[in-house]
Image (spheres, rainbow, N blue to C red):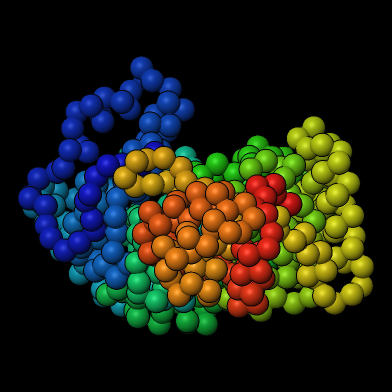
Amino acid sequence: MYTKSNDEFEDGDFDDYDDADDFDFASALVTDELTDELVRYWGDLRRIEEENKVIRVNLSLTAALNKIPAKWLDAACQANRLALQGNLRKSRRAKVAALVASLTSKDELRRCVTELPPRARAALRRVVDNGGWMRLADLTRDFGSMDGDGWFWDEVPPTSCLGELRRRALLFVGRTSRTKDGKLGKRMFKVAVVPRDIRDLLRSILSEAAICREEEAAFVKRFAKPEDALNDAICAAHGYYDVLDWQPPLERCDVEDFLRYVSRHGFDPVMAWFGIEILLAFIETRLHEIQSLDDLCGYHISELASGFVDMSYMQRWTLDERRNLIHLVRYLYDRLYERGRILVETRDEVRRACARLVSGKRKLNLIRRPPPIGGELIFIRVNPNTGEEERYTFNHQRLLMVWAGAFHQDWRTMLSVCETVPSGAQKAALIHELIALEPSICDLIISQADEEDFDRAILWFYEDRLLELSAW
């Protein structure tokens, strides 16, 4: 659920009164007239709406506290043992000041951290070690979602791992497009942020030996239970699908079924979800080709394991890790076939491709795409002026290469030559489409071509017919 609010977690104060989240309607909901399930559902909707507000990744503790709902502020005071009496009971400004004083005191912050469950402490460490903020999806993948945490934290504290941190005002959630290099990306995504003025204190406290030993012991005990790992994997998958702005052919129910399937057969569902998340990211980059589960081809699996993981993930993938990813795709498609989600021909092609790629040879780019015919889609966009979808193919790319390599970006001369080449009228029609494009879009389309493609494109322009068939 996305909010239309433009509110940001920035410096500034509310007036000294509770905000709209404390009106009588909110209190009226917590009555016997509605079931606990309905209250929890409504609370989750309100919480998710709050999480969709914009957040600064280097916000201060004061700025963060000034923007959270009044009920969460009260919950933070309770969790940090600040009695809501006198001026502190009525004044929002006083509550914020008291919390800032408490959480910036090393002794009080250490007490707060030591009272955390070890797993919540490990999640806090993950964010601090990552520079103080990270994608929420990456955090929930390992530490579970916040489903069911609701809204009325002053009355019913959140129960999730991350909810424990948020209730204590150690972690804040919102949306940003800021990337690690400080630049603005094209998409908004949810992040978890530790306020900048307590990061160094937390780093020092979390490095203390006793705290590290307690976390390690807790994790060893926890992961002895397979059902805990399965629950974490499913929660991570739910968190991923909850924030998607596109519709993958691999549906949430497919993923949940597969995670339960691998868990029953003794495999680690957390690692299985990690592989599926990579597969979903790959599909998103090729959504113009993979619009259904039956569209996955052998060369897609080869590209996934050989090139995509290197371009999309910072760590260097070993050969065994790449092969494990291929095995995961094979098992996933076997399961999809058992459930009637794909054709037998698709399952057989995936099996053959996976067997070939893990046959013992070190190269994983063995399965190449067939040579393009011309109608293969390489770029799709929605025109911001007309709102209509525009589709650009390998033929468009070829013509752009000819325009740049043979005609020195002179469309008029190129159009006159079209009168003498095979399929000249069709080529001219596509050229008129390209002339109307912004230069940045032309640059984007041509940037996907290799240098050696230019000579082949020029030869095609002068000697071959234009075909609209697709080999991909």
On the rendered structure, is 443 left or right of 104?
right
Q: Residue at x 55, y 68 (%)?
A: 402
Residue 3 shown left or right of residue 284 in the figure: left
Residue shown at the point (7%, 50%) measured from the top left: 15
198 left or right of 143 in image: left
Task: Using the rendered view, name the quadrant where residue 116 is placed.
Answer: bottom left
Counting from the top left corner in percent of width and height, residue 29 is at 31, 26
Query: Residue 334: percent from the left, percent from the top?
Result: 84, 45
Placement of 346 over or under 212, stated as above or below: above
> Looking at the image, which is closer to me, 38 or 414?
414
Q: Residue furthest top?
A: 33
Q: Position of residue 210 (x, y in %)?
A: 52, 78
**Is 207 above or below relative to 25?**
below
- Residue at (49% x, 68% y) in the render: 403
Image position, residue 471 (x, y; %): 74, 52
The N terminus: image quadrant: top left
Residue 422 falls left or right of residue 210: right
Is residue 101 something that shows in the picture? Answer: yes
- Taking the image as drawn, is residue 324 in sight? no
Residue at x 14%, y 43% (from the top left corner): 18
Residue occupying the far front of the picture: 420
Looking at this view, is 39 or 292 the one in front? 292
Q: Nearer the viewer, residue 323 or 453?
A: 453
